């Protein structure tokens, strides 16, 4: 069996363990993970925010790249650094947003799903581009349209800012499709991306700039 087929087999196993129900009673703390790349290293930042969208914890990881970018297999490149950063947190979130896909993936095993299964924690994928599925384009700010793949609802396409392209919201695991939208929507303040991901993105790129110096 080739390396590619081995990784696909792992994804199929991951897909078989997905839970699309809410596995938490409430969301007081919400985390977010984002990545940056420098030479052959993958950097990850995770921030944890309270209900007021204030940072209460953060952690970083720097891992050597072990696999190149392969469409559909992003989780094996970016997942390990997120897992490493998550383990370094002093305060664990109730739900973790991940800059990437959840079950809106050809094998239902996007980055958010991979991370959620590996960490046994509820995750939501928030991506800026469609990986798979069909949808009606939302036109008004605050409008959400279902993302359909193989006759299943795998998430929502959400117009977070009137003048910008929509974002794609999908459960990773441990979260229902409906709650994925609600939780992400509750994290939006005045930007295209939910506040936790926006902050994680900013901080990991600050790390990249520091390292590159």
Image (cartoon, rainbow, N blue to C red):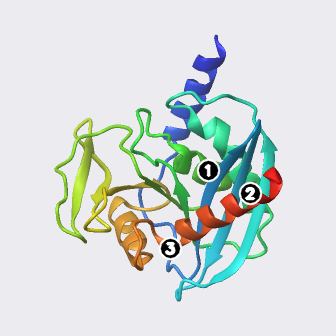
Label 1, secondary structure: give it: helix
The span from disc 2 to disc 1 (Cα, nearest Å) is: 26 Å
Q: Residues within 10 Å of mark 2 (few under 14, many from 20)?
A: few
Whole-number angstrom distance, CA of label 2 to CA of label 3? 21 Å
- Above or below for 31 versus 124: below
Task: Choose top left, top right, bottom left or bottom right for residue 2.
Answer: top right
Picture disc at residue 195: 3
| Residue in the foreground of this view, choosing between 152 and 165 | 165
Q: Badge 2 is on which residue?
A: 209
Answer with left or right where residue 126 lies relative to residue 61: left
Q: Residue furthest bottom?
A: 52
Picture layout, residue 119 above or below residue 15: below
Separation of residues labelled 1 and 3 (CA atoms) = 20 Å
Question: Quadrant where the N terminus lies?
Answer: top right
Q: How far from the left and from the top, in percent, is residue 198?
A: 53, 67
**For the residues carrying marks 1 and 3, which lies nearer the camera in this image?**
3
């Amino acid at each position: 069996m080739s390396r590619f087929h081995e990784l696909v087999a792992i994804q199929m196993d991951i897909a078989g363990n997905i839970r699309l129900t809410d596995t938490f009673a409430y969301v007081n703390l919400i985390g977010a993970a984002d990545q940056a790349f420098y030479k052959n290293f993958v950097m990850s930042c995770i921030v944890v925010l309270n209900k007021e969208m204030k940072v209460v914890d953060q952690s970083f990881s720097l891992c050597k790249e072990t696999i190149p970018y392969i469409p559909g297999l992003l989780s094996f490149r970016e997942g390990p650094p997120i897992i490493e950063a998550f383990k370094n947190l002093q305060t664990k979130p109730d739900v973790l947003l991940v800059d990437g896909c959840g079950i809106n993936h050809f094998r239902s095993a996007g980055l958010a799903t991979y991370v959620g299964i590996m960490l046994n924690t509820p995750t939501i994928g928030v991506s800026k581009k469609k990986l798979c599925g069909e949808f009606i384009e939302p036109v008004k700010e605050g409008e959400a349209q279902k993302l359909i793949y193989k006759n299943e609802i795998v998430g929502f396409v959400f117009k977070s800012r009137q003048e910008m392209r929509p974002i794609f919201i999908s459960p990773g695991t441990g979260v229902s499709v409906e709650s994925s939208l609600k939780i992400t929507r509750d994290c939006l303040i005045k930007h295209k991306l939910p506040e936790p991901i926006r902050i994680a993105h900013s901080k990991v790129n600050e790390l990249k700039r520091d390292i590159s110096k």
